[in-house]
Amino acid sequence: MGPTRTSYWQEALSSHKEVVMKLRLFTLSALAAGLLLGTAAQAQENEPVQPIPAAVVTDPARVELGKKLWFEPRLSRSGFISCNSCHNLSMGGTDNIRTSIGDRWQEGPINSPTVLNSSLNVAQFWDGRASDLKEQAGGPIANPKEMAFTHELAMEFLSSIPEYKAEFKQVFGKAEFGIDEVTTAIAAFEETLVTPDSRFDLWLKGDKKAISDQELAGYQLFKGSGCVACHNGPNLGGTSFQKMGLIEPYQTSNPAEGRAGVTGKDADRFNFKVPTLRNVELTYPYFHDGAVNTLTEAVDTMGRLQLGRSFSAEENAQIVAFLKTLTGKQPEIMLPILPPSRDNTPRPVPFGS
Amino acid sequence: MGPTRTSYWQEALSSHKEVVMKLRLFTLSALAAGLLLGTAAQAQENEPVQPIPAAVVTDPARVELGKKLWFEPRLSRSGFISCNSCHNLSMGGTDNIRTSIGDRWQEGPINSPTVLNSSLNVAQFWDGRASDLKEQAGGPIANPKEMAFTHELAMEFLSSIPEYKAEFKQVFGKAEFGIDEVTTAIAAFEETLVTPDSRFDLWLKGDKKAISDQELAGYQLFKGSGCVACHNGPNLGGTSFQKMGLIEPYQTSNPAEGRAGVTGKDADRFNFKVPTLRNVELTYPYFHDGAVNTLTEAVDTMGRLQLGRSFSAEENAQIVAFLKTLTGKQPEIMLPILPPSRDNTPRPVPFGS
């Protein structure tokens, strides 16, 4: 893996069909190379998927502050919704519902993507409108359909609480802090939310018994049929934008137009960031509209719409079995204790307008 | 402490005014006894408040299962609301809003009481309609204004998930399980949610430096003026039902009638379970209607309405300072990882009717 490989894929993926072909050739040559070199370890170096590296925490105080903010419902107008409401770390970093519930129970426009391993994505949100986690973190707080707060009110709340003031000062080395420090801390926490040591990663690292024959057959099919053209790299996705409904159009009542909303280009309509397949067993329902509940159906739909291929029941089961080997070690989160509001802290507005 | 003391108070508290008098006499005699005996330790044995004992976990597997269920939003119709939504263990076991947000953002009828130390209460809910935690736990799941599920659907959900089936079997020693086992496990987890080692408890145990002079003066005032008539025992409350607005009527737009709804007796109108004062710094807003945001206002209102006494600003500050010594060690909760839904698991219904 590394920047070179990633750049290669990013460029290559500009044309999906071309890439499916390239990928098949790549896969064949990689397999051939592995066979020639004759060692399992070397064959795995040529895989288009790489193991997830464990998180390296360089500033634990910053991460700890970010964790508090992550679980902080007082960053919402109602005092009820936190980052964890829609990216629940008990449930694969998602809410497991089709589209999220926002302030006043508003129906969200799109399925909440998992926060797990999201630091490995090339951009954030389904349409990639935020370039990184820090930029993303400010969005939901101020989105009137999500947490429905404002950055100003968020700062008024945080500044009224001595423990937060002291902690921001300790972490950032200065008394003043604003939304920039808030989102920096949240992003620092999110960067720790990686899931190493899935069974597939153990296999990639050379443990041949880590996955079953059926699971291995699923991986080979996943590579050979072209899934890996988009779902590659350590995150099995997250490296490119691709059209949903490449070969057959995708039928949905969801009005999201994807990347076109960011670039303004008609060619980007229905282009969405390829979602990670890490922990995909936990991140149902699937697709940007959350329309599909099961991996069996998701694999079938993807095969037909993106690859023009109907997987047999056996093939589908193999791929699903492989996908379930991608569930990694979930982050161990000690629930933070949040400092109490003070007499002068603005109060949540859970009801009324 | 112990059953004898508790029974004494429960009987005595049947008439509040009488008790205020008794308490003053009791306090005076206790203080006199302490002085006569001449030792701090003995004086503390006579205190009407006792330290919170640490939780004793006899069945960790049961507690662990209960913890999963506590954080399980799939026990709600929407898949969004868990026990922890309204009794947030990051925020003193409450939601810190006036009345809770339920399914479809319905406004709850009453302020969510803290789950912390709730096992020490004589009954559950503000009106005591559940005799214990197990009985309480089934309520919100099936309440159409709260989690809006049914016990049948809850069982259908849990039974579809192999990990839950295995865990119930391991904990209860049989393959079949129902709502009875669900609420038993939740109650077992809740029983661990105690907060020992507050500064006041350290003081009660003999550490004279654990609280300041102002805080001690607050405690003496708390005892001497009659607050402790109702807020006594290890939980500083939770042992009796008392009329809200004893001396002056309490003005509220909240229609809750309290204990009368359970007993059918007119004399029980506006009788509510005395809330614990443990961690009261964290459990704002106050009173059954959540109408009061600050401890200063709560102490002032209680003094006037329940005791017919106007505390001076200095006295009020002393009592508030004392109340803040009641914040104990918060439970350390490792966030559980919930087992994923399966293809046959019923899906949440977050929107629509």
Image (cartoon, coloured by chain):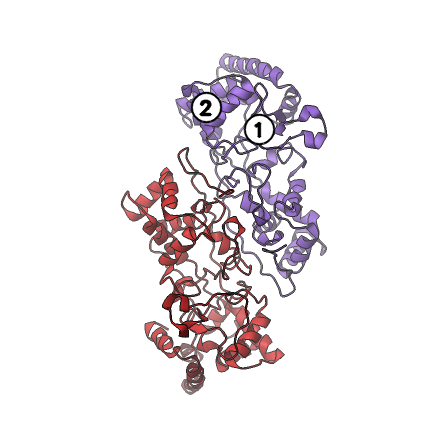
Chain colours: A red, B purple
Residue A205 x, y percent position in the rendering = 44, 72
> Dividing the image into 4 quarters, which one contains the C terminus of chain B?
bottom right
Residue B332 x, y percent position in the rendering = 49, 44
Which secondary structure, mark 2?
Answer: helix
Label 1: chain letter: B
Mark 2 Cα within 10 Å, few/some/many (few <14, many 20+)?
many
B243 and A268: which one is in front?
Answer: A268
Label 2: chain letter: B
The residue under label 1 is B237
Q: Is residue A113 above or below residue A219?
A: above
The residue under label 2 is B319
Mark 1 Cα within 10 Å, few/some/many (few <14, many 20+)?
many
Task: Say which amino acid is labelled 2.
Answer: Ile
Mark with earlier residue (2, 1): 1
Identify the residue shown where x is 55% and y is 82%. A309
Residue A120 x, y percent position in the rendering = 39, 65
> Relative to B244, is A49 on the left or the right?
left
A182 and B247: which one is in front?
Answer: B247
Q: Is residue B263 above or below residue A197?
A: above
Same-chain status of marks 2 and 1: yes
Q: Is residue A327 above or below residue A315?
A: above
Task: Say which amino acid is labelled 1.
Answer: Gly
Alpha-carbon span between mark 2 and mark 1? 16 Å
Q: Is residue A268 above or below residue B64?
A: below
Q: Quadrant of residue B157?
A: bottom right
> Dividing the image into 4 quarters, which one contains the N terminus of chain B?
top right
> Relative to B94, is A187 on the left or the right?
left
Number of labels in the image equals: 2
Which secondary structure, mark 1?
Answer: loop
For residue B142, say whether it is visible.
yes
B199 and B240: which one is in front?
Answer: B240
